[in-house]
Amino acid sequence: MPSLQEAKDKLINSQIWRSMFRGGTWKDTSRDRAQHILGNVWLHLHPARIRQRAVRFTYTWGLGGLSFGLFMILTVTGLLLMFYYRPSVELAYRDIKDLEFAVSLGMFLRNLHRWSAHTMVLLVILHMVRVFLTGAYKTPREFNWGIGVVLLVVTLFLSFTGYLLPWDQLALWAVTVGTNMASATPFAGAEGPFSNLLGITNANDARFALLGGTSVGANTLIRFYVLHCVAVPVVAGALMIVHFWRIRKDGFSAAPLPGDAPEKKMEVWPNLVVREYIGAVLMLVFLIAWSVLQNAPLEELANAGVTPNPSKAPWYFLGLQELLVYFDPWLAGVVLPGVIMMGLMAIPYVDPDAKRGVGYYSVKERPFANTVFLFGVGLWFVLIFIGTVLRGPNWSWYWPWESWEIHKSLPPPSWSLVLVDLTDKAGVFFSSQKTPGLRIPGFLGIGAALAAAGGMIGAYFGAGLALPKLIHKEIPFRRALWVTAVASLFVGVAAKVAHVFLRHHDFIGKNISQFGPTEIAYVAVVLFIVVLMGFLLPQKFLRTSPQSPVQYVTTMLLLLMMLGVILKMGARMGFNIKYILSLPAINLNL
Amino acid sequence: MTEPHDEPKETTPLLNPELTRRGLLAGAWAAFGAFVAGSLGASARFMLPNVLYEPSQRFKMGKAADLPLGVTINKKERVWVVRDEKGVYALWSRCTHLGCTPNWFPAESRFRCPCHGSNFNVDGDVVAGPAPKPLWRCAVDVTPDGDLVIDKSQMENRPGFRDKGSFHVTV
């Protein structure tokens, strides 16, 4: 009776086995192990040898590899689900019900597909954060970072297109809201700015092309099916090939630190392959357990007449849904996501130092970059948290301990700082449903209104760009923090005092009916954040940075836009200010 | 003795002699660019269907005279028919923000949207929330035998236009 070891040796040195894996008789030498990686089509994406630091779990957390693993799980489960799913309005929902109740393991496969998709979105985001924190996007990896940003968007688009396929209420309304954002695109969407000047209607705009009709219907279902099952996965696959190939060609970021002795390299077979295998198995075990324990949601059959109350997008889009409460759809749905994507891609090109903080978690070496980036990611997750946890029926604000059964009082009327009325030729200040506001007729009024709004926005960006560079003196940071905090609180209290005097005034009194401690807190907190992030931090770190003027302006514009989101949210939540500028004639609202 | 040979003939050159190799290539690139642009345009046009099999936008809603005062909800056709002392108008039940169907709260006399919290009054004007425009009103008419006909293919939401003409009917 041969021992297990003997049987194994016999097997791997048999002619059949050796014909499958190139490299001749296996003698388990270093050369054999390298050849095993290089001579195998599936493994040769790996290098034969790798730096030991790069294999450390706490460097990568395995996030990129696990994202790819999830893509594979999603491909396999998706392929299986396709055997039972027919993308037509009459059949789709029934087929999903069949998968849940009549097909062996159908429910499990659908759960696994859904939970893997959620996990993949999360891991891709975390992968991006990890790459940022270790400076792994810097030269020569700028382009691959950009590919990664596109892959993140593709991942989100895959989730979005898949969301419609069950044809339930959740699907219909998430996609209705999502595709309506396309109709807010400037020029190309029927409800976006300037489109009425080009003869764009809801029967020829961007949303119409996406839906294949004027509302979510049979054409939309087949379009999303083809996008979800064929078109977008092909794009994702092509981009992943580029992404992985560039990682190999650009070299892995965990390079030896300056001053370190040259590292000993480690053999990828079996050291890295085993780690990847363990990671994949643990993730699969986790997902299988999740899929056994919790079923993917399926609501009632899609019904265009009834919107579930509240109607919520999947969690990764709830930040966007929450943002849509504070901004006009063309800004929140089109411009801001576009700016976020372009801004992320711009990061490697506005970073002035290609060497600093690469290959390790460089919090101290790159304080500005890390603070701003984590602040942005944090802001996005705060929005997701608000949308997920704090929003109830009629999208009212509910604390977790409040019951959704209890009706919230009506939201107060909102108002616009400046409104340009082109039909009646007038500029209107402080108008709302309750007060007509201060109306200046004629072109004088229009000019005054545009100048006021342009002045406000121009002053914000102008001061934000200029101040950090104009003040050359080193500001003691800790003391400045205290001064800013006290000054912000003081401004909040001063605004309250002003309100006491002006509360009987027509515009102020009717538009801002309440000014209590909450409102003072809004003013103080928002002001503090904006001054800290928009002035103190750049003044301290960017003033002396070797950035070129273009790099500086790009960085500051992105930062100021991010803070503008907070300013606008504060203005909306605290003081019901809907628009800074409203120009209804061309659907332009800021 | 030499062969008599003809005088060189005036030949018309196949190509314009002014045309350089560089110029020809530029033209070829331009043609290729035009081809790509045309293909993309044609593909984009392909994505816009010419025939839609969507339900008719024109439908009847029973006898106009039988409508109760206030808001009548028609979920199937996605309209609210409002009857007041002056007559009848029809609001399209589609939030002008991002297209969800708001709910009617009679006690508060408001339409409230579940997706982003927009509020509209019974005229369709935005009272609160992010919606940028008033609700759209559909064309309404009464047939000779008294049926209320609503046409969702004609819409109006501007004050001064939405409450007369084909968007308002006295019953």
Image: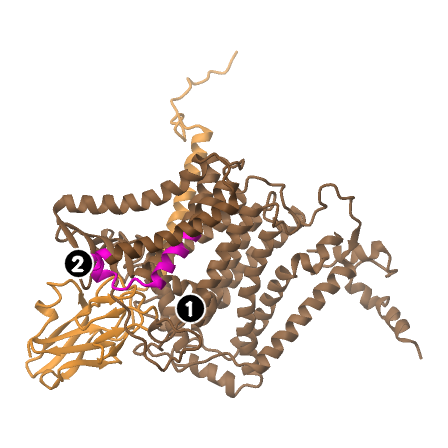
Chain colours: A brown, B orange
Q: Which mark is residue A506?
A: 2
Q: Which mark is residue A230?
A: none
Side of A45 where A314 appears, left or right: left
Tag count in the figure? Answer: 2
Name the magenta segment's main secondary structure. Answer: helix
**Chain of the residue on which disc 2 is drawn:** A
Q: Which residues are magenta?
A: A501-529
Residue A381 locus on image (x, y percent):
48, 63
Three-letter amino acid code at the position of disc 2: Asp
- For marks 2 and 1, give the CA distance: 34 Å
Q: Earlier in the sequence, mark 2 or mark 1?
A: 1
Q: Quadrant of residue A77?
A: bottom right
Q: Which mark is residue A387?
A: 1
Residue A176 locus on image (x, y percent):
35, 69
For the residue pair A200 and B94, the one nearer the viewer reads as: B94
Query: Residue at horizontal 23%, vertical 66%?
Result: B126
Residue A319 locus on image (x, y percent):
43, 64
Mark nearest the camera among 2 and 1 is 2
Three-letter amino acid code at the position of disc 1: Gly
Residue A497 lies in the magenta-colored region: no
Q: Quadrant of residue B92?
A: bottom left
Query: Residue at horizontal 37%, vertical 41%?
Result: A463
Side of B131 where A56 appears, left or right: right
Residue A317 locus on image (x, y percent):
44, 65
What secondary structure is found at the residue carrying circle 1? helix
| Labels 2 and 1 in the same subunit | yes
